[in-house]
Amino acid sequence: MRIGLYGGSFNPAHDGHRLVSLLAMKRLDLDRVWWIVTPGNPLKSTGELASLAERMAEAERASAHPRIDVTDFEAAIGSRYTVDTLAYLKRRCPGIDFVWIMGADNLASFHRWRGWAEIARMMPIAVIDRPGWTLKATHSRAAAALSSARLEEREAAALPVLKPPAWTFLHGPRSHASSTELRRLRRTSSQGAR
């Protein structure tokens, strides 16, 4: 079984998240993608964070694919950090070939994540291009540190079975959808309705 793990606040989930998942499924030959809806990102403000139940419901609607599973297990296991979540999954599911999926915007700041180098040694990583982030991501501190582990994009289907550190940068259809922009539009809409 080859499973892509796609974590985030999903505040709110949108078509861009689904597009990333479908691209990863196709290019990495994945059986499934699990959306890990986090209790909250330690690097982001929680001021506009919708409840976990609301974000789960929106993620279920946005995923709309039989091979995308939406989960909130991170809250159940009490994890706030990706490194802890991935270690938990590796222990619990030793026979599964997992791949961590992240957007190019996350690679640009990956060096700020708790245990980022450990994450790279724990699991292969697929970075999906995002509008406006290609150069920032590929020239980031983490990309430079992991440059010798980068897999050519044309070989991406092999990524799930490679011994980490291993990562690739995938190009494909890109979405301009943004959770930040969707929250801004909702605020503006609710203020106009008053």
Image (spheres, rainbow, N blue to C red):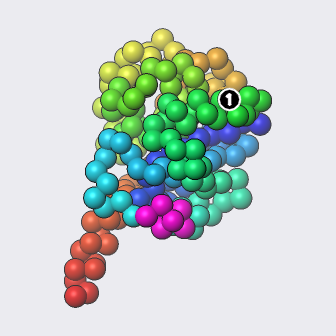
134 lies left or right of 45: right
Please tell me whether residue 52 belongs to the stretch shown in magenta: yes
In terms of secondary structure, where does tag 1 sit?
A: helix
Q: Which residues are magenta?
A: 51-57
Residue extending farthest to the top is: 148
In the displayed structure, does residue 79 sit left or right of residue 181? right
Q: 61 or 151: which is nearer to us?
A: 61
Residue 165 x/y as whole percent: 55, 18
Residue 35 shown left or right of residue 51 in the figure:
right
Looking at the picture, how far across and down is residue 123, in whole percent? 58, 26
Residue 62 appears in the rendering: no
Q: Quadrant of the rendered structure where residue 178 is?
A: bottom left
How far from the left and from the top, in percent, is residue 127? 48, 34
Tell whether position 47 is magenta.
no
Q: Could you tell me what secondary structure mostly forms the magenta stretch?
A: helix
Q: Position of residue 37 (x, y in %)?
A: 51, 52
How would you rate the neighbour count of disc 1 (Cα within 10 Å): few for under 14, some for 14-19, many for 20 or more? Answer: few
Disc 1 marks which amino acid? Arg
The residue at the far bottom in this view is 194
Label 1, on which residue? 91
- Which quadrant holds the C terminus? bottom left
Q: Which quadrant of the figure contains the N terminus?
A: top right
